[in-house]
Amino acid sequence: MNIEDMLEINDCPLCDGGALLEEECGCGYYVMCLECGCHSVTIDFHSEEERLDAARRTVMLWNTGKVISSSPGE
């Protein structure tokens, strides 16, 4: 089963756009808004055992509104 299918990712807390869990270079995960481009921090993992936990932690941060935006004034 795909990790994305196991996790519920809320819409963007800034613009209500759709969001996507992305894997970065096979060593970390972040969530990114498909509309405004804001994103979460990248949570790294160092082994297959840590992979799912990193994805869960990343999605949890996103779902609680912890996002990075490059909008003016942010």
Image (tube, rainbow, N blue to C red):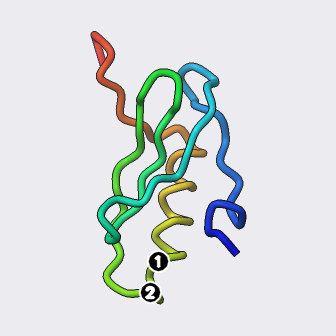
User: Under tag 1, what secondary structure?
Assistant: helix
Contact, mark 2 vs mark 1 (Cβ under 8 Å):
yes
Q: Which residue is mark 2?
A: 48
Q: Quadrant of residue 24?
A: bottom left
The residue at 55%/55% (across/down) is 59
Q: Residue at x 48, y 57 (%)?
A: 58
List x then y, in percent, for residue 53: 51, 75
Which image quadrant: the C terminus? top left
Residue designated by label 1:
51
Q: Does 35 sit above or below residue 50?
A: above
**Is 8 above or below relative to 47?**
above
Residue sitting at x 60%, y 45%: 63
Front in this rendered view, residue 1 or 46: 1
Q: Quadrant of residue 20?
A: top right
Quarter of the image with the N terminus is: bottom right
Q: How far from the left and from the top, in percent, is residue 22?
A: 46, 53
Q: Amino acid at mark 1?
A: Arg
**Kind of residue at badge 2:** Glu
Q: Nearer the viewer, residue 71 or 47?
A: 47
Vertical arrangement, residue 7 with respect to residue 38, above or below: below
Decide: few, some or many residues near mark 2? Use Cα within 10 Å; few <14, some 14-19, many ≥20.
few
How many marks the image carries: the answer is 2
User: Residue 18 appears at what percent x and percent y?
Assistant: 63, 32
Give the structural element (helix, strand or loop) at label 2: helix
Extreme residue in the top direction:
72
The mark found on residue 70 in the picture is: none
Question: Residues under labels 2 and 1: Cα distance?
Answer: 5 Å
**Label 1: few (<14), some or many (≥20) within 10 Å?**
some
Residue 8 pos. (x, y %): 71, 54
Identify the residue shown where x is 48% and y is 47%.
Answer: 31
